[in-house]
């Protein structure tokens, strides 16, 4: 029976993954993500039900649009598959089984699924545009507030710890408003800081600190590789732009998921 449950969770994960790809494409373009019907970005033809089945449609259509035969980017298949696998792995490590489907277990699972929405969409948009969308940051804040209410009311968590995080949110938002009025643009660093606070609330300080360390190591390795390549190609200093294109949000999301999986596995198998 547990296998059937995990199959259902995988399917749910791929559905979420399909939504991620839609949101990653539409949000930077200020397009509606809830009411507008899905369409092919090349020929603008509305997609039917058989075109929208996560993973299966991509494989069945051989990675091409049914109507214009334009190739579909592999990221759709990759994100949907990774989302499904992540959902299953987290559910397994959280001991979500048929015989323990209590309300608290379902609530924790639901919050984790919504948190992954935040991570995947934020990371996808940042990877393509190097931008932390304010709407995604606000979604993370509202989700965090709902999670804090749940923890304090249902699980009797220490509210004072979370009040500190809420104060930090307010400070960052205030700074964002001030700089927005002065410089007429949104600050990338503010989005990163709000992302880190959201990670602290959902995954704890230990996982978040490890996430930051892993991200900095990944960025340092990326810079080192590019510096070595530039030396071989003798690229001039003014032509080096890669350091301005580092997507910290993307790397933070990947590092956070990996660290979360590691901690869950540690508690499941070693504690």
Image (spheres, rainbow, N blue to C red):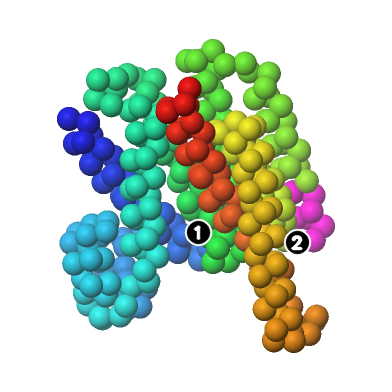
Q: Between 10 and 111, which is closer to the camera in this rendering? A: 10
Residue located at (25% from left, 20% from top):
99
Q: Is residue 147 above or below residue 121?
A: above
Range shown magenta = 176-184
* Residue 241 visible, this angle: no
Image position, residue 85 (x, y; %): 34, 47
Extreme residue in the top direction = 156
Sequence-wise, the earlier of marks 1 and 2 is 1
Q: Between 76 and 35, which is closer to the camera in this rendering? A: 76
Image position, residue 203 (x, y; %): 56, 34
* Residue 78 visible, this angle: yes
Q: Which one is in front in this view, the residue at disc 1 or the one at disc 2?
A: 1
Q: Between 30 and 146, which is closer to the camera in this rendering? A: 146
The mark tally for this picture is 2
Q: Mark 1 to mark 2: distance in Å?
A: 25 Å
Q: Which residue is tagged 1?
A: 124
- The verdict on residue 177 being magenta is yes
Extreme residue in the front direction = 270
In the picture provided, is 26 more to the left or to the right than 129? Answer: left
Image position, residue 35 (x, y; %): 35, 54
Residue located at (33% from left, 73% from top):
72
Magenta stretch, overall SS: helix
| SS of the residue under disc 1 | helix
Label drawn at residue 184: 2
- The verdict on residue 6 being magenta is no
Residue located at (53% from left, 60% from top):
125
Image position, residue 192 (x, y; %): 67, 50
Q: Which of the 4 image quarters holds residue 62?
A: bottom left
Q: Between 138 and 197, which is closer to the camera in this rendering? A: 197
């Amino acid at each position: 029976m547990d296998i059937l449950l995990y199959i259902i969770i995988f399917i749910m994960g791929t559905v979420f993954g399909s939504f991620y790809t839609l949101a990653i494409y539409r949000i930077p373009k200020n397009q509606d993500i809830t009411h507008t019907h899905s369409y092919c970005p090349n020929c603008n033809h509305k997609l039917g039900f058989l075109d929208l089945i996560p993973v299966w449609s991509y494989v069945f259509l051989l990675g091409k649009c049914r109507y214009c035969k334009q190739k579909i980017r592999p990221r759709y298949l990759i994100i949907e598959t990774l989302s499904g696998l992540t959902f299953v792995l987290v559910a397994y490590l959280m001991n979500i089984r048929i015989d323990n489907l209590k309300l608290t277990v379902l609530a924790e699972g639901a919050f984790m699924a919504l948190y992954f929405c935040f991570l995947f969409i934020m990371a996808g948009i940042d990877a393509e545009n190097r931008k932390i969308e304010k709407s995604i940051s606000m979604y993370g804040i509202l989700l965090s507030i709902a999670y804090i209410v749940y923890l304090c009311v249902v699980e009797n968590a220490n509210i004072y710890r979370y009040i500190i995080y809420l104060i930090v949110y307010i400070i960052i938002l205030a700074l964002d408003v001030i700089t927005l009025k002065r410089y007429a643009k949104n600050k990338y660093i503010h989005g990163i800081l709000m992302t880190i606070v959201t990670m602290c609330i959902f995954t704890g300080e230990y996982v978040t600190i490890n996430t930051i360390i892993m991200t900095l190591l990944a960025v340092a390795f990326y810079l080192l590789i590019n510096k070595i390549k530039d030396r071989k190609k003798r690229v001039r200093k003014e032509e080096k732009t890669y350091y301005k294109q580092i997507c910290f949000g993307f790397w933070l999301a990947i590092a956070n998921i990996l660290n979360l999986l590691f901690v869950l596995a540690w508690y499941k198998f070693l504690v």
